[in-house]
Amino acid sequence: MEEQKNQVTFITEDNEEVIFHVIEQTKLNGYTYLLVTDSQGEGDDGVAYILKDMSAEGDEASLYTIVEEDEELNLIADIFEELLEDVEFES
């Protein structure tokens, strides 16, 4: 995954590139989490995802996975809601 300022390029299993815009970042238990969206700008209701950095120390590129496990997802979503007072997550 290639990172640029405020965006990451996610490579899917089908080798497609998807650009996500980073809304917020946090760390928990040694992992970095990103709150990202596929929205192209204001007024565009995009879908938000939480990505978890699974890369090992010293890796050249970051390896993010989409958080799908309910307990972890709810915990990190709560943290992002606190960081961004005007954001509420829907499942």
Image (spheres, helix red, strand yellow):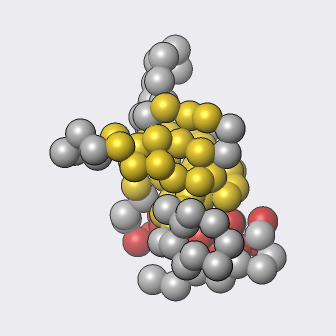
In the rendered view, would you say 57 is above or below 23? above
Q: Position of residue 58 (x, y in %)?
A: 52, 14
Image quadrant in which the C terminus is located: bottom left
In the rendered view, would you say 31 is above or below 35? above
Residue 29 seen: no
In the rendered view, would you say 76 is above or below 2? below
Residue 55 seen: yes
Give the residue displayed 68% in from the left and 38% down from the top: 5
Q: Position of residue 52 (x, y in %)?
A: 49, 48
Image quadrant in which the N terminus is located: top left
The answer to which quarter of the image holds residue 63 is top left
Give the residue displayed 52% in from the left and 20% down from the top: 57
Front residue of 79/50: it is 50
Q: Position of residue 59 (x, y in %)?
A: 47, 18
Q: How many marks?
A: 0
> Is residue 10 shown left or right of residue 21?
left
Give the residue displayed 59% in from the left and 54% down from the top: 21
